[in-house]
Amino acid sequence: MSTDVVWPVSVQWAQLTLRPLSMRDRTEWDSVRYRNREWLEPWEASNPLPGGDPPTFRQFVRLMRTQARQGASLPWLITELNPDTDRHELVGQLSVSSIIGGSFRSASLGYWVDAAQAGRGIAPMAVAMATDYCFKHLHLHRMEINIRPENTKSLRVVEKLGFRDEGLRKDFLHISGHWRDHRSFALTSPEVPHGLVHRFTGSNVPMTVHRGRS
């Protein structure tokens, strides 16, 4: 695989933090996911093969942790500092997957945000943070995001960030019980020499990277 993945690692910019999912997140995770079940279900990956129960939360966390330690993924929660409670609250999830090094140096990125927080710029900011981390710290060359053509809210995220539309992929992923077409978007490191966070926000404030458990 030959990448520079270090795990666990967290990335912070202003009130927003990308941090590892852990067992202690179960109560809040279950609450947010249950509240957003109708919002997320049309866009959720599914298993095309019959049989088999979905993983438990504990199994899911262990799988994510194993893949991260193998250098294949970065499974992050998106949290935001609530100034009233001084607590970082779960507002979504972002995962960098299919991390490949060598002459390819590429990865794919997927995300979701709590419906109650949609429209506040959280998703594009989290994508910008993850992309900058991968370009600067993993020395990746290319980031890819694949989105169903019907997912207009997610399409606005890549449009705001300037990802290039590379065309339609027929029956690309099994989503919500069926093989679904996706539009593929990509960005390469030379296209954002000062970073995607800088291009999106206009700010020169750097991200903070924390290695080890948050």
Image (spheres, helix red, strand yellow):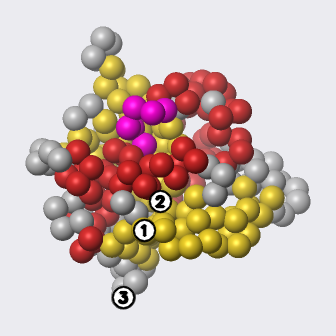
Q: Nearer the viewer, residue 127 or 185?
A: 185
The amino acid marked with disc number 3 is Ser
According to the image, label 2 marks what residue?
109
Q: Quadrant of the N terminus?
A: bottom left
Circle 2 — which element?
strand
Q: Is residue 119 magenta?
A: yes
Identify the residue shown where x is 27% and y is 31%. 15
Disc 3: CA contacts within 10 A as few (<14), some (14-19) or many (>=20): few
Q: To which residue does mark 1 refer?
A: 164
Residue for point 15% across, 45% down: 203
Q: Which residue is mark 3?
A: 103
* Residue 118 position (above or below residue 102): above
Q: How far is mark 2 from mark 1, CA to CA?
A: 14 Å
Q: Residue furthest top?
A: 84
Asked if residue 21 can be seen in this view, the reply is no
Q: Is residue 20 left or right of residue 33?
A: left
Residue 60: give x, y in percent of width and height.
61, 47
Residue type, label 1: Arg
